[in-house]
Image (cartoon, rainbow, N blue to C red):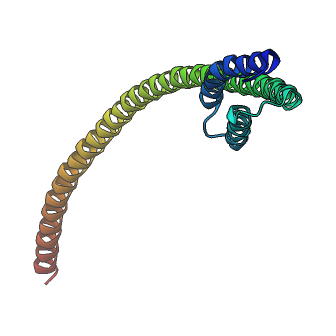
Amino acid sequence: MRSPAALGAMSSLLSHNKDQPRIRKSLSDSSPTSSTAATKSQRHERLSRLSSSGSSDVSNDTSTNHAESYFLRRENRLSARKRAEEEAANNDYKKMYEKALATNQRLKSRLETSKQELAMIQDQLQRAQKDCGSNRLETEKKESRCLQKKISDMEEQIKVKGELKVENQRLKDENGALIRVITKLSK
């Protein structure tokens, strides 16, 4: 038979063992990939084995409870630190997202102004091409008029030249006839 103190210690161990699976569950939920979480769960398993071994030594129970409470407090501090680091990382992601968003907005506005400038330049280019095209037409018209005038002047000169040739031939013929008449008279 066991003493009432030993029974009380065992009942406290049993009640503590009931709470322990919840602690393990929270450990595995917090970060299953973390190596520190794995070592912590191993410690808890060791402690639970020690507490379930059925030792009736009350001093061993209190040292086990102290060790368990120490590990729980340490685990809570580490999980709080981890949460703070995760929140800081989330804040960093938020800052990075906000920076990226601001950069995106700035680039969009620059793109929009560039598009407007491009549209203005294309409009100016089209007007310049129209002006240049109309100027070319005018210069081509002037050149064609000038060439037509030169052609008509040359045609007239050709007509005059033809008339002069005919006149020159007639004068040569007359001159030759006069020379023959003079030579007949002088004989």
Q: Is residue 118 left or right of residue 3?
A: left
Nearer to me, 68 or 90: 68
- Relative to 32, say whether 113 is above or below: above
Q: Answer left or right for 141 relative to 12.
A: left
Of 146 and 101, the residue lying toward us:
101
Q: Which quarter of the figure is the N terminus placed in?
A: top right
**Which sits in the foreground, 88 or 11?**
11
The x, y position of residue 84, in whole percent, is 78, 22
Q: Is residue 129 left or right of residue 43?
A: left
Q: Evaluate whether residue 103 shows in this view.
A: no
Measured as percent of width and height from the top left, residue 71 is found at 81, 30
Q: Residue at x 78, y 30 (%)?
A: 56
- Which residue is located at x 46 percent, y 29 percent? 125
Based on the displayed image, in which of its 4 quarters is residue 28 positioned?
top right
Residue 72 lies in quadrant: top right
Number of marks in picture:
0
What is the x, y in percent for residue 67? 85, 31
In the rendered image, the residue lying farthest to the front is 1
Q: Dividing the image into 4 quarters, which one contains the C terminus?
A: bottom left
Q: Position of residue 24 (x, y in %)?
A: 63, 28
Of residues 12 and 174, the one nearer the viewer is: 12
